[in-house]
C-alpha cells in the first residue's frame, strides 16, 4: 500500500482535533498508512482499532494548543515592536546591509543602496544590478565576504547576493527610514521620492512581463491528443 512519512504527529497539522480527525479519516479510508518517524508508529485501519485513535486526539490537541500559544506570542512580539517603533526606540530586527548594529547608516553602503535604486530607475534589471555589484565590490557582494559583513547575518550563512536579494532591497521601506508603515524609525538612505518612483517602475515592469502574448498561429497547431499547442 501507500505510505505517508512524517516526522511526528504534530507535523500532520495543527488544526482543531475534530478537523484533524476528519482529515486523517479520509487518508486512512483511501488505503494510505501514516508512519511517524520519531516513534515509528504506523496509523492505519487496523492500528486505529486498538486504541491509537484516543492517543491521536490527545496529540492533535497538544499541537493545536501549541500553535495557538505560539501565534499569540508572535502577535505580542509584533505589537511590542510596533510600540517601540512609534516611541522612537530601537527595535529587534535583521539589519539590512546599509545599517550598522546600532541601526545607523553606514555612509559608504548607503551610497551603494542609493545607486541600486538609481540603476533600476534607469532601466537596469535585478540580474544586471547584482552582476554590477559583484564586479565593482567583489569584497562585499562577490564570494569574498568580509567576516563581519552585515549581510552575513546570524541564521543566514549564504555568501551570495542574487537577483532576488536585489528585488527585496528595492521593495524594502527601511531604505527610506520606515519600519512597516511607521516613518522615521531609521535614518533614511534614499528619499521617499526615489523610493516611490522605483515602486512605480517595479509595478510597470511586472505588468509588462505578465501581459499575455497573442500569436497568429495560436489555436492552429494541435497535439495528437487534440489539445491546442502553446508557443
Image (tube, helix red, strand yellow):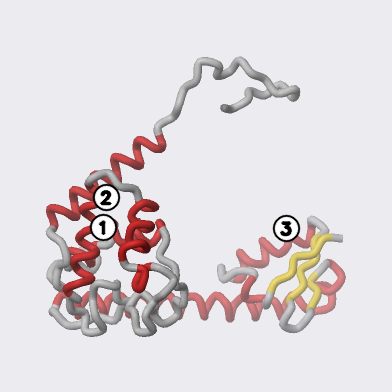
- Nearer-N-terminus badge (3/1): 3
Which quarter of the image is occupied by the N terminus? bottom right
> Secondary structure beneath disc 2?
helix
The residue positioned 44% from the left and 29% from the top of the image is: 212
The residue under label 3 is 26
Q: Which mark is residue 116?
A: 1
Q: Nearer the viewer, mark 2 or mark 3?
A: 2
Dot 3 lies on which element? helix
Q: Quadrant of residue 114?
A: bottom left
Q: Residues within 10 Å of mark 1 (few under 14, many from 20)?
A: many
Residue under numbered circle 2? 120
Looking at the image, tell me whether mark 2 or mark 3 is earlier in sequence order.
3
Percent position (x, y) of residue 45?
84, 67
Front residue (pair 167, 41): 167
Label 3 vs label 1: CA separation? 52 Å
Q: Distance between the residues labelled 2 and 3?
A: 51 Å
Amino acid at each position: 500500500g501507500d505510505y505517508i512519512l512524517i516526522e511526528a504527529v504534530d507535523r500532520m497539522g495543527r488544526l482543531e482535533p475534530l478537523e484533524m480527525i476528519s482529515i486523517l479519516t479520509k487518508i486512512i479510508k483511501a488505503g494510505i498508512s501514516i508512519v511517524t518517524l520519531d516513534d515509528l508508529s504506523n496509523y492505519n485501519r487496523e492500528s486505529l482499532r486498538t486504541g491509537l485513535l484516543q492517543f491521536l486526539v490527545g496529540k492533535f490537541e497538544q499541537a493545536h494548543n501549541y500553535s495557538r500559544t505560539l501565534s499569540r506570542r508572535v502577535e505580542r512580539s509584533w505589537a511590542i515592536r510596533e510600540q517601540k517603533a512609534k516611541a522612537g526606540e530601537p527595535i529587534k530586527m535583521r539589519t539590512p546591509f546599509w545599517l550598522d548594529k546600532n541601526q545607523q547608516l553606514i555612509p559608504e553602503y548607503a551610497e551603494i543602496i542609493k545607486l541600486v535604486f538609481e540603476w533600476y530607475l534607469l532601466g537596469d534589471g535585478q540580474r544586471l544590478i547584482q552582476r554590477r555589484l559583484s564586479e565593482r565590490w567583489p569584497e562585499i557582494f562577490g564570494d569574498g565576504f568580509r567576516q563581519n559583513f552585515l549581510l552575513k547575518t546570524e541564521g543566514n550563512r549564504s555568501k551570495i547576493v542574487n537577483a532576488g536579494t536585489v528585488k527585496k532591497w528595492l521593495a524594502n521601506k527601511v531604505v527610506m527610514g520606515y519600519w512597516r508603515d511607521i516613518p522615521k524609525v531609521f535614518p533614511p538612505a534614499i528619499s521617499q521620492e526615489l523610493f516611490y518612483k522605483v515602486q512605480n517602475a517595479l509595478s510597470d515592469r511586472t505588468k509588462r512581463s505578465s501581459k499575455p502574448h497573442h500569436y497568429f498561429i495560436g489555436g492552429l497547431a494541435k497535439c495528437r491528443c487534440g489539445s491546442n499547442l502553446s508557443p
